[in-house]
Image (cartoon, rainbow, N blue to C red):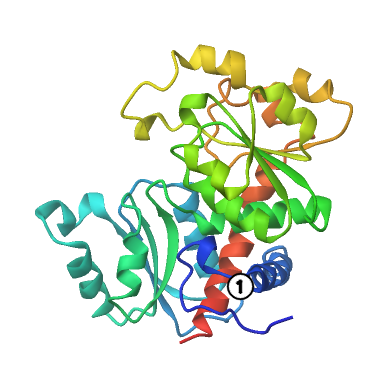
């Protein structure tokens, strides 16, 4: 197996190789052992300073990155646009250059504009980790999803993964499609036709009209949140109607003639995408995803830091 990642930045899954993905997942196994030890810290990034730049609201991703950085013994700076000079009109590049003047080695960035991390990677010397750019990509979520699946299923070669819900507004969906296809999985989507982008067919992705068909086909159901905050138009009549046609319940899972895994990137709209009894059922690996997120992000930052 290759010993170092092929890129200085993690801008998206589209930009990395299959070997990079395998290296990150193998490295994450080691770090998962670390975070389950009594002493959970290692000095791997002791001399590295990381700036967390979140220009968009986040709880889970930001906390996961912060914890991963602390476990690696990195020094961290946390920045949110709500309390910053961005509100006074400062540009993205000025903000980042001011932070880099403080001798920052790596930037973890979430931004509402697709391509913002790519723009920065051409302008500054620090490593960039994309923590989500608009509705484009969310690479570390796709990697932790793949890691969580491999823990349960082993190799993903030939496995069937259904991505269900708001595909149109999801950065998780696109990163998952790129990542899982590179690992040999078959992908299908399911959701209201108004929330399925037309370009998905060009990526070799199947489409199911009903949740029942998707569940019967798949080994893994990755259920996405309805992102009302990103929807400028009304894409379906009501949340009640969405739940009626595309929500998943424990009864539906138990009625299948096989075992499947249920995932969700969080936060869950309980009673909309998933009923509580489905989210908390033995089918669900949602809490495993949260734990694995720290290990995978540790692996990503550790491997990128070697490229300086």
Q: Is residue 292 visible?
A: no
Is residue 192 something that shows in the picture? yes
Circle 1 residues within 10 Å: few <14, some 14–19, many ≥20: some
Q: In the image shown, does 40 or 212 lie closer to the viewer?
A: 212
Relative to 230, 150 lies left or right: right
Quadrant of the rendering where the N terminus is positioned: bottom right
Q: Position of residue 100 (x, y in %)?
A: 27, 77
Please indicate whether residue 304 sits to the left or right of residue 155 in the image. left
Dot 1 falls on a residue whose secondary structure is: loop
Query: On the image, which quarter does residue 143 sit in?
Result: bottom right
Q: Residue at x 56, y 80 (%)?
A: 6
Residue 226 vs residue 270, the one in the foreground = 226
Q: Measured along the vertical axis of the image, is residue 268 above or below residue 98?
A: above
Residue furthest to the left: 88
Q: Position of residue 77 (x, y in %)?
A: 35, 68
Q: Does residue 71 appear left or right of residue 211 in this picture?
A: left
Q: Which residue is mark 1?
A: 41
Q: Position of residue 293 (x, y in %)?
A: 60, 56
The furthest residue to the right: 257
Name which residue lies at 55% across and 22% down.
Answer: 272
Foreground residue, 149 or 215? 215
């Amino acid at each position: 197996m290759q010993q170092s990642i092929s890129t200085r930045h993690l801008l998206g899954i589209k930009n990395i190789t299959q070997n990079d993905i395998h290296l990150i997942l193998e490295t994450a196994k080691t770090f998962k052992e670390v975070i389950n030890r009594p002493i959970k810290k290692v000095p791997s990034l002791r001399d590295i300073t990381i700036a967390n730049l979140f220009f968009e609201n986040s709880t889970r991703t930001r906390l996961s990155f912060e914890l991963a950085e602390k476990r690696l013994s990195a020094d961290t700076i946390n920045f949110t646009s709500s309390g910053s000079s961005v509100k006074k009109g400062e540009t993205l590049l000025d903000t980042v250059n001011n932070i880099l003047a403080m001798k920052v080695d790596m930037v973890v960035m979430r931004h509402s504009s697709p391509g913002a991390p790519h723009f920065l990677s051409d302008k500054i010397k620090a490593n960039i980790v994309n923590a989500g750019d608009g509705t484009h990509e969310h690479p570390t979520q796709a990697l932790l999803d793949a890691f969580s699946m491999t823990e349960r299923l082993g190799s993903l070669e030939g496995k069937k993964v259904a991505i269900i819900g708001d595909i149109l507004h999801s950065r998780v969906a696109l990163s998952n499609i790129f990542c899982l296809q590179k690992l040999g999985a078959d992908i299908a989507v399911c959701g209201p036709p108004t929330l399925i982008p037309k370009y998905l067919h060009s990526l070799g992705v199947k489409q199911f009209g009903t949740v029942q068909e998707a569940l019967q086909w798949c080994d893994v159901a990755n259920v996405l949140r309805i992102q009302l905050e990103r929807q400028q138009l009304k894409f379906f009549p009501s949340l009640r109607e969405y739940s009626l046609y595309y929500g998943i319940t424990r009864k539906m899972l138990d009625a299948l003639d096989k075992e499947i895994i249920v995932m969700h990137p969080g936060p869950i709209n309980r009673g909309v995408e998933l009923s509580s009894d489905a989210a908390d059922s033995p089918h669900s690996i949602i809490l495993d995803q949260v734990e694995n997120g720290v290990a995978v992000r540790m692996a990503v930052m550790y491997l990128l830091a070697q490229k300086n």
